Amino acid sequence: MILVTGVAGFIGFHVAKVLCENKAEVVGIDNVCDYYDPALKRARLDRLKDFTRFHFYEADICDYSFLTSLFQQHPITKVCHLAAQAGVRYSLTNPFAYQKSNNEGFLNVIECARHHHVENFVYASSSSVYGANTKMPFSESDRVDTPVSLYAATKRSNELVAHCYSHLYELPCSGLRFFTVYGPWGRPDMALFIFTRAILEGKPIDVYNNGNMRRNFTYIDDIVKGVVLTLNAPAAYEIYNIGNSRAENLLDFIHEIERNCDKKAEMNFLPMQPGDVPETVADITKLKKLGYDPATNIDEGVKRFVEWYRGYYAETF
């Protein structure tokens, strides 16, 4: 049985769906908070509830007593810990939300995992841990002691805690440094969602650093493949970059959205935002050794997202 935390979230939903389709027994937990529209989270959950092997609990990972009872109730053998307070910019104004969910919540989940001797503990880190690094592409062996946002600092903290638990308790731990995940059912606070909505509504979009940004935009299906690979390959302690095989210019990404929306974007060019970085490029050599092979380019990925968006919000247009 696999525990997926943050199961109503973007990545958690897709991971749980694929696990269920592969006949795994999945226990999902999510507090369905209002960081963004809870209706979107519940719509994701509605699609998971069709699986008889899926068991959902609406609860908070910061509730340690609930977590201990959950582990006692279910024979959990693997943990996929994806619950967290997301967002770099939100961390600038709501720091305590990150301390609570990303630090305290992480400790609660990994404590339960070690007490119940799970076979594998896979958790979400972030490409943001590379912070002020300028050497490209980012490699797992690079130093990551210069975070430029509290969000990044909490993710690096998770990696260090996992290392301690691996060393002290022989708990297999794998951390996944996600690189700019996008696709259907994505988060409304992310660029693709924000840009698509604004373009379709004829509103301007804010483009930071005057558009001089490069990102490893990684389609959700490729991300899920990487998560499942690591769940099935326990390691004493590992960190993996999980991104696309190439970086894209932000303006090229925007042009793909324009093409699929059949509308031009009105762009408001602005300087770099605090906590942001101009470029993220992943070295994915290590994860490729497990069989990881991202296959979706932005032309196909953006097309699928816009199609989903138009369908989901059909009543808006």
Image (cartoon, rainbow, N blue to C red):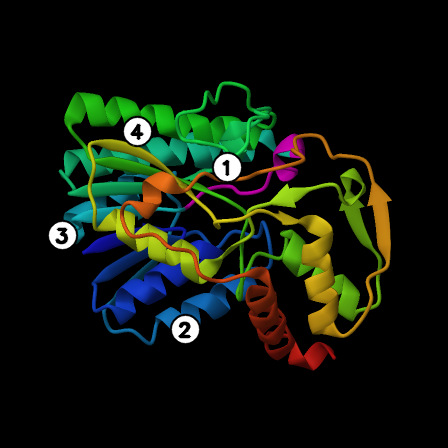
Q: Which mark is residue 127?
A: 1
Residue to which mark 3 is pinned: 75
**Residue located 25% across and 49% down the image:** 231
Give the mark nearest the N terminus, 2 or 4: 2
User: In x, y percent, where is residue 180?
Assistant: 55, 48
- Residue type marked 4: Ala
- The quarter holding residue 258 reads bottom right
User: In x, y percent, where is residue 106?
Assistant: 36, 35
Mark in front: 3 vs 1: 1
- Check contact, mark 4 vs mark 3: CB within 8 A: no
Based on the picture, tell me whether residue 201 belongs to the magenta stretch: no
- The quarter holding residue 313 reads bottom right
Q: CA distance from mark 1 to mark 2?
A: 29 Å
Name the quadrant of the N terminus. Answer: bottom left
Mark in front: 4 vs 3: 4
The magenta segment: 83-93
Q: CA distance from mark 4 to mark 1?
A: 17 Å
Q: CA distance from mark 3 to mark 2?
A: 24 Å
Mark in front: 4 vs 1: 1
